[in-house]
Amino acid sequence: MSSRYDNLLANVPTDLWIGGKWRKSSDGGRFDVLDPATENKIASVASATVEDAKAAVDAASDAFEGWAGRKPRERAEILRKSYELIMRDAERLAKLITIENGKALSDSRGEVAYAAEFFRWYAEEAVRGIGAVSRAPASGARIVVQHKPAGVAVLVTPWNFPAAMATRKIGPALAAGCPVVLKPASDTPLTMLALMPILEEAGVPAGVVNVIPSRSSGKVVSAMLHDPRVRVVSFTGSTEVGRKLLHEAADNVVRPAMELGGNAPFIVFEDADIDAAIDGAMIAKMRNMGEACTSANRFYVHEKVHDEFAKKLTAKMAALKIGNGLDDAVAVGPLVNADAKKKVIELVDDAVGKGAKILTGGKAPSGPGYFYPPTVLDAVPEGAAMLREEIFGPVAAIQSFKFRHDRAQPRARLRSGRALRRHEAVGHRPRGRARRPDGVLGDAVHFGDVVRRMVGWVERSEPHRVVAGSAALSPSHGKKAPPWTC
């Protein structure tokens, strides 16, 4: 391990955080965490067992009454202090994210600010658990609605945003008075373990937040979901795993909050400002190197502007510097692991084999690290797997169309999008297009699962409805109570 890593990793905990104490796993098991830029081992982390999961639920359950009994303002002040301490340690946490995840340091810095903001937001929401009083229309009886903490919450987070996807779950749970057991992704457990001393310093009591990395994720999470003290499960990850967790949660009627996979379209019409569309495309495609469920995978471009758009997008993508994310000049780091790199290679090879044209990139570099270059493919055929599956990498797939309804039938088969982005002129378009932004596009694209984090229900979009991303900071309004309350 190089000296530049030694200093960053020297004080990062690597054991389980249960009941406010560090402890080894019950069977002594550990697993390695690799730096995706070098493929070198950077840490050995304790791997939780089912027994450890039970101990974590025990700790959370023991802490429940005391934490739920705290005044909302007290919980709010602890969350606010957590925000301040994260921002104090922002640079250290950003570099740690880059080391274990691979993303460019600029992306990691943005994620730390994003992650901290959830604690500041929910510090303000903690004092707003407002109920309601009304009268029954028939009997005239008084109806009183109160929001109370639901109980222990199990949180399962992904590797692509190891800080932010955890704090966006921890924040509302703690604000509502619920203790949590968090199982981070085994590719990126260090960031969340490093956050525990910060939360302790902020005043989070022992047992309120527990972190149990594990290589036996299925068994560990299943055991917790079948513990009657667990009342909420929140998961961000693939649709396939989400379905399994929903089945598991149903056994004890555990309330779920699911944020699942996507395959978002990016549509450019003939009257669009192409330079603005390119700027939007680069953000939509290359945020987090394309390793995001809201990332734009499929680019549908009107034939009149196709050549200009493809040329400019190719130039922008080709200019991005690839390398170790710790270097400030680097814009594109490695993918998170060997499987992620293999999947991107297979998707690109499949599309090219079926007729797609490589405009830039398209071939992984030799040498260590899970690197894949920014890639633009044109004329991607309908049969290409990347039009149906999440790419989760720096690859843009372009198709052209002639009429507004050209893409309706192909896209109607793709029901997993999480964010639509469209570019067209606003000033002098036909009345139908100005007044019905969801008209043809709603017929053409079925948008997928959108989690409103504070409200916490999973919304499956209907045809004709346009959904533009998830309401990550949605206030507590809507049809249902937050998942953290009952």
Image (cartoon, helix red, strand yellow):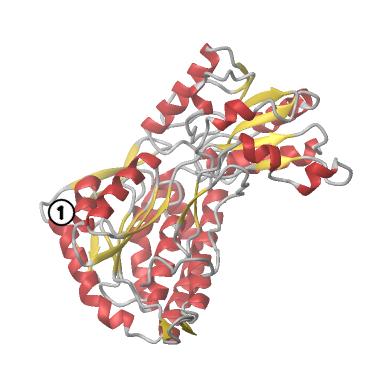
Amino acid on which the number 1 mark rests in the picture: Val
Q: Residue at image x 60%, y 20%?
A: 380
Q: Is residue 371 left or right of residue 224?
A: right
Q: Of 444 and 338, which appears nearest the observer?
A: 444
Q: Residue at image x 64%, y 18%?
A: 379
Q: Indicate the quadrant where residue 275 lies.
A: top right
Compared to residue 318, the image places residue 34 above or below, namely below
Q: Residue at image x 70%, y 41%?
A: 439
Q: Residue at image x 50%, y 80%?
A: 128
Compared to residue 209, the image places residue 325 above or below, namely above
Residue 156 can be seen, yes or no: yes
| Residue designated by label 1 | 50
Q: Of 395 and 140, which appears nearest the observer?
A: 140
Numbered disc 1: secondary structure:
helix
Q: Farthest residue toward the right?
A: 428
Where is the N terminus found, in terms of image quarters? top left
Circle 1 crowding by C-alpha within 10 Å: few under 14, some 14–19, many from 20: many
